[in-house]
Amino acid sequence: MPLEAVEARRLYRQVADQLRALIDSGEYGVGDRLPTERELAEQLKISRPTVREALIALEVEGRVRIRVGSGIYVSEPAVPSQPVPAEIEGPFELLRAREFIEGAIAEQAARVATPEDIVRIDASLEAMATVQHPGEDSMVHDRAFHVAVSGCLDNAVLVRVVGELFDQRLNPYFAKLAHYFENPQSWSAALAEHRAIRDAIVARNPEAAGKAMREHLARSQARFARNFGTETSTATRVKARSS
């Protein structure tokens, strides 16, 4: 059963559906190694982040196991698995939305932030600097920073939107992806990026504040998109399975 190119409608779900169908049909048996992210992206004519979202979804289902440095392998599900829920957005989709929305919010925050707003932003940064990551406390203080920036606009709707978007990090797909790539070093980098956002807001520089926020969320995407270390070619096996 050859893989088919997919159309633009929550692509990661379509990719997950196709890969699940290949597994269920026996094209890939338990213990078999799937093609690499790069090979899947090339065959499906989509981005590698979309492929990664699909693979993470399948790992959450228990259908595959990602072994960093080795590959993605088909697993024997411990219990009957469920298809990817329609209501869960992919991690990269969420981060791109936040990049757009929070970039604009940071620009306006630099125009209107009060001394009280800066106190709240600074308090969240001080708390972030004292906690270990990954962990529940670090997420609480990370969220508090982004909410504090949005709070500068004195708009309850925007505060709620930013908080709800951040809370999507708690969904199982985002948590699984973070498991592979978040560590004390990534936390230090994120904290430095947060401080750059704060400094631009304090300096009343809208352009710099928006740029710093967008760069922070773009770098978050880049951190989650780092290579699993599984790029050894499997082209011969893929060709054989698709013939």
Image (cartoon, rainbow, N blue to C red):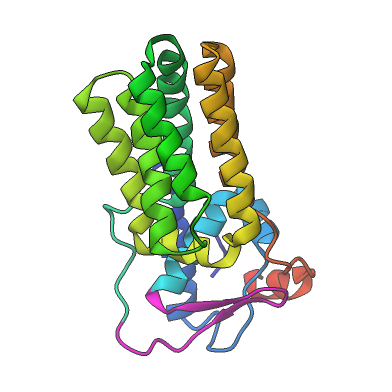
Look at the image and tell me whether residue 128 can be seen.
Answer: yes
Give x and y (percent) for residue 137. Answer: 39, 59
**Does the segment drawn in magenta span residue 215?**
no
Q: Is residue 93 above or below residue 234?
A: above
The C terminus lies in quadrant: bottom right
Look at the image and tell me whether residue 44 can be seen.
Answer: no
In the shown orientation, is residue 157 left or right of residue 232?
left
Give x and y (percent) for residue 183. Answer: 59, 62
- Along the line of sight, the residue nearer the viewer: 75 or 157: 157
Q: Is residue 125 above or below residue 242?
A: above
User: Which residue is at a point 51% across and 18% down the rendered structure image?
Assistant: 202
Which region shows up in magenta?
61-80
Give x and y (percent) for residue 23. Answer: 48, 78
Give x and y (percent) for residue 204. Answer: 51, 11
Q: Is residue 150 above or below residue 4?
A: above
**Residue 66 in which image quadrant:** bottom right
**Does the segment drawn in magenta span residue 76?**
yes
In the shown orientation, is residue 16 left or right of residue 188?
left
Q: Is residue 146 above or below residue 78?
A: above
